């Protein structure tokens, strides 16, 4: 399986808690650490099948401590809350960047439905 959207640059901005991905065609995605944490592709977050997703609460201040390459197709992100089991393949990260606005709104809606208020 060859990734179609491998980034040419990856920058972690610790101060703003944003992972920036730059692609050969000039596309640039800026994904907040909180967003990447709550949409981790790990079983802890996604569950073991459709409809089993686990809403992640209290991740507003999470940061990325390490970015570890996984072959030529992905990275493993190690978060400050200890979460480190998600493997983010290049195509998944690209889709997350393209769908950021809708996915972020879905997360905010799910938090509201659960009665959770995000810290500002």
Image (cartoon, rainbow, N blue to C red):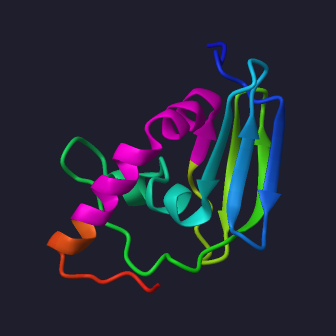
Kindly identify the residue that appears in the image at 44 percent across and 86 percent down: 119
Within the image, what quadrant is residue 87 found in?
A: top right
Q: Which residues are magenta?
A: 87-109
Q: Is residue 110 left or right of residue 73?
A: left
Q: Is residue 9 magenta-colored?
A: no
Q: If the image is split into quadrants, where does the N terminus sit? A: top right
Of 31 and 55, nearer the camera is 31
Q: Is residue 14 left or right of residue 39?
A: right
Kindly identify the residue that appears in the image at 80 percent across and 42 percent down: 69
Of 113 and 49, nearer the camera is 113
Kindly identify the residue that appears in the image at 64 percent across and 15 percent down: 4
Kindly identify the residue that appears in the image at 79 percent across and 57 percent down: 12
Query: How many badges with numbers are in the image?
Result: 0
Q: Examine the rendered structure and indicate whether residue 39 appears above or below residue 92.
A: below
Q: Main secondary structure of the magenta part?
A: helix
Within the image, what quadrant is residue 58 found in?
A: bottom left
> How far from the left and from the top, in percent, is residue 59?
49, 76
> How far from the left and from the top, in percent, is residue 56?
38, 69
> How far from the left and from the top, in percent, is residue 27?
68, 28
Q: Examine the rendered structure and indicate whether residue 1 appears above or below residue 61.
A: above
Q: Is residue 87 left or right of residue 6?
A: left
């Amino acid at each position: 399986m060859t990734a179609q959207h491998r980034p040419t640059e990856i920058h972690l901005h610790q101060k703003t808690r944003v992972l920036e991905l730059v692609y050969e065609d000039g596309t640039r995605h800026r994904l907040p650490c909180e967003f990447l944490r709550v949409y981790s592709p790990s079983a802890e977050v996604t569950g073991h099948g459709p409809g089993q997703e686990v809403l992640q609460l209290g991740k507003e201040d999470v940061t990325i401590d390490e970015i570890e390459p996984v072959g030529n197709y992905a990275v493993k992100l190690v978060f400050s809350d200890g979460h480190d089991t998600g493997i983010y393949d290049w195509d998944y990260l690209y889709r997350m960047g393209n769908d950021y606005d809708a996915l972020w709104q879905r997360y905010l809606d799910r938090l509201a439905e659960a009665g959770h208020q995000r810290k500002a």
